[in-house]
């Protein structure tokens, strides 16, 4: 594994540990963090089987880092407005009139955008046509996003409603799932247009 990739994965592992210090939502934290830990711990195996360029892997790590921050506070409670007030003296409520915490919306866009390089790389063995490859990757990410929304719905059927709401972060929006999927698709399309000119990001590295 290249040094840069190993360092990126170790940094993600360290971040997961740090965001769980004095975890304020221990009842839902495992649902968020266990998949991330599994990804990092299994990385030496899956990167040998499905290698990625370093930029593609860093994008993947960046998404899970954003997810780890969301998992620290739950997505509905990430205190980004507090951080903005500390940095600039204002926040999104004052600037845009927002009353909803939009961190989950941001991460759904990031899901589509940051997973596109890795998804394109893994699909590159099926086609050499760039337009077909990027379109297929966007469709696959949309399908994954839809499957995740179904998973969140199933949680509401088996978990305590308050715990499920804390995990899902709908914040009373009945169209939350549809908006999340649309934002993920928008992120993947934007990233796909950007990747169309950067072949090195989605070239499958050789494995010796």
Image: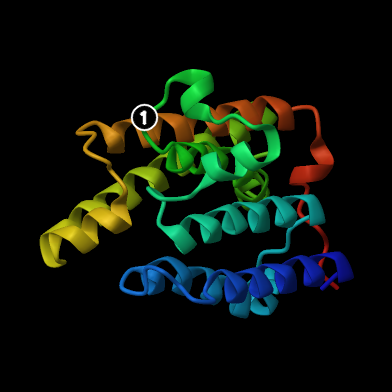
At horizontal 56% and vertical 71% (from top left) the residue drawn is 39
Whether residue 165 is visible, yes or no, is yes
Quarter of the figure with the N terminus: bottom right
At horizontal 60% and vertical 44% (from top left) the residue drawn is 83
Whether residue 129 is visible, yes or no, is no
Looking at the image, residue 38 lies above or below residue 120: below
Q: Residue under circle 1?
A: 99
Relative to the observer, which residue lies in front, 121 or 44?
44
- Quarter-of-image position of residue 48: bottom right
- Quarter-of-image position of residue 133: top right
At horizontal 49% and vertical 19% (from top left) the residue drawn is 96
At horizontal 81% and vertical 58% (from top left) the residue drawn is 205
Q: Which element carries disc 1, helix, strand or loop?
A: loop
Residue 50 position, x and y percent, is 66, 64
Residue 81 position, x and y percent, is 53, 39
Quarter of the figure with the C terminus: bottom right
**Image check: 106 left or right of 194?**
left
Relative to the observer, which residue lies in front, 82 or 149?
82
Dot 1: within a 10 Å radius of its alpha carbon, few (fewer than 14), some, or many (20 or more) residues?
few
Relative to the observer, which residue lies in front, 107 or 113?
107
- Asked which colour scheme the image uses, the reply is rainbow
**Image check: 12 left or right of 161?**
right
In the current view of this chain or complex, which residue is farthest to the left?
A: 157
């Amino acid at each position: 594994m290249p040094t840069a990739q190993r360092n990126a994965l170790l940094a993600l592992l360290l971040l997961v540990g740090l965001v769980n210090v004095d975890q304020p939502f221990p009842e839902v934290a495992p649902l968020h963090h266990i998949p991330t830990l599994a990804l990092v711990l299994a990385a030496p195996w899956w990167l040998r089987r499905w290698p990625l360029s370093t930029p593609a892997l860093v994008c993947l790590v960046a998404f899970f880092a954003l997810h780890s921050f969301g998992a620290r506070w739950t997505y509905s409670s990430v205190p980004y407005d507090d951080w903005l007030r500390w940095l600039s003296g204002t926040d999104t409520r004052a600037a845009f009139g927002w009353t909803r915490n939009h961190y989950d919306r941001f991460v759904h866009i990031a899901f589509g955008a940051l997973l596109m390089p890795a998804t394109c790389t893994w699909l590159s063995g099926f086609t050499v046509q760039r337009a077909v490859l990027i379109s297929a990757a966007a469709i696959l990410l949309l399908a994954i996003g839809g499957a995740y929304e179904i998973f969140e719905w199933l949680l509401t059927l088996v978990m305590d409603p308050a715990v499920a709401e804390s995990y899902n972060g709908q914040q009373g929006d009945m169209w939350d799932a549809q908006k999340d999927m649309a934002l993920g698709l928008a992120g993947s399309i934007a990233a796909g247009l950007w990747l169309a000119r950067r072949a090195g990001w989605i070239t499958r590295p050789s494995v010796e």
